[in-house]
Image (cartoon, grey):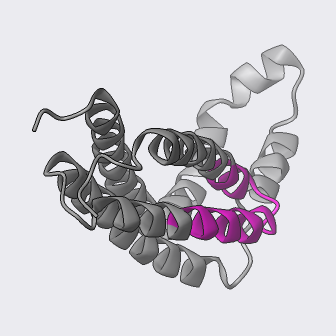
C-alpha cells in the first residue's frame, strides 16, 4: 500500500519535533547549571564592559540589577527543570516512535498519535503555566516555545483527524 502524503508529512514533522524535543530536554535539564554559570560570569563581563557602559551613559549597576532580576529563580525551579526535562525526553521519544508507527501504517498508529499528542499538549500547557510563574526570561522562553509546539500539535491533530480515518487498518 502506498503511503498517503499526509502520513509522510505528519510523520516527518513528528520526527523533527521529537528531535528538537530531545535537544530541548537536554537544555532544560542543564538550565540550572547554565544560569549558575552565567551568574558567575556576569561580574567579570560587567567589569570588561564598564567603559562601554559609561560611553553610552548607562550605569553598570542598573544592568546587573536587571540581569539579577531576569535570572532570579524560585527555589523550586531546579526541580521543575529536572521533572520537565525528563517528561520532555519521554514525550520526544514517544513522538519519534509514533512517527515510525505511522510510517509503517500500523493498526495502533493513529490512536497512539492521538494519545501522545494529547499528553504532549497537556504537558506543554502545564509547563508553560508553571514556567510563567518564575517571572523570568527563562520562564517566558519556555512558555513561548511550548505555545508554538501546541499550535503545531493542534494542526497535526486536525490533519490526522481529517485525513487519517481510513488510512491505517483498524
| Quadrant the C terminus occupies | bottom left
Which of these two is toward me, 44 or 143? 143
Give residue 84's position: percent from left, percent from top: 51, 73
Give residue 95's position: percent from left, percent from top: 33, 58
Please identify the residue farthest to the left as the structure is shown: 1
Determine if the magenta segment contains residue 130. Answer: yes
Is 133 above or below relative to 6? below
Q: Is residue 85 visible?
A: yes
Please identify the residue farthest to the top as the structure is shown: 55
Quarter residue 15 falls in: top left
Which of these two is toward me, 31 or 98? 98
Q: Is residue 88 visible?
A: no
Determine if the magenta segment contains residue 95. Answer: no
Is 162 left or right of 57, judged from the image as shown?
left
- Determine the residue positioned at 84% across, 52% down: 65
- Determine the residue positioned at 28% across, 61% down: 109
Is 7 left or right of 142, judged from the image as shown?
left
Q: Which residues are magenta?
A: 120-143
Give residue 2's position: percent from left, percent from top: 13, 32
- Determine the residue positioned at 23% across, 58% down: 169
- Determine the residue positioned at 26% across, 56% down: 96
Give residue 61's position: percent from left, percent from top: 84, 45
Is 145 above or below relative to 117? above
Which of these two is toward me, 23 or 91? 91
Which of these two is toward me, 136 or 169? 169
Magenta segment, principal secondary structure?
Answer: helix
Amino acid at each position: 500500500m502506498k503511503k498517503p502524503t499526509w502520513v509522510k508529512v505528519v510523520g516527518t514533522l513528528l520526527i523533527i519535533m521529537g528531535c528538537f524535543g530531545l535537544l530541548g530536554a537536554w537544555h532544560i535539564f542543564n538550565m540550572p547549571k547554565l544560569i549558575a554559570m552565567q551568574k558567575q560570569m556576569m561580574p567579570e563581563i560587567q567589569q570588561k564592559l564598564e567603559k562601554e557602559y559609561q560611553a553610552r551613559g548607562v550605569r553598570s549597576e542598573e544592568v546587573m540589577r536587571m540581569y539579577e532580576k531576569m535570572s532570579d529563580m524560585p527555589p523550586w525551579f531546579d526541580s521543575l527543570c529536572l521533572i520537565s526535562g525528563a517528561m520532555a525526553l519521554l514525550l520526544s521519544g514517544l513522538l519519534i516512535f509514533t512517527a515510525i508507527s505511522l510510517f509503517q501504517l500500523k493498526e495502533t498508529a493513529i490512536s497512539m498519535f492521538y494519545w501522545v499528542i494529547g499528553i504532549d499538549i497537556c504537558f506543554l500547557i502545564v509547563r508553560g503555566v508553571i514556567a510563567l510563574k518564575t517571572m523570568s526570561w527563562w520562564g517566558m522562553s519556555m512558555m513561548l516555545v511550548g505555545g508554538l509546539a501546541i499550535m503545531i500539535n493542534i494542526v497535526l491533530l486536525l490533519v490526522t483527524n481529517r485525513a487519517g480515518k481510513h488510512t491505517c487498518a483498524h
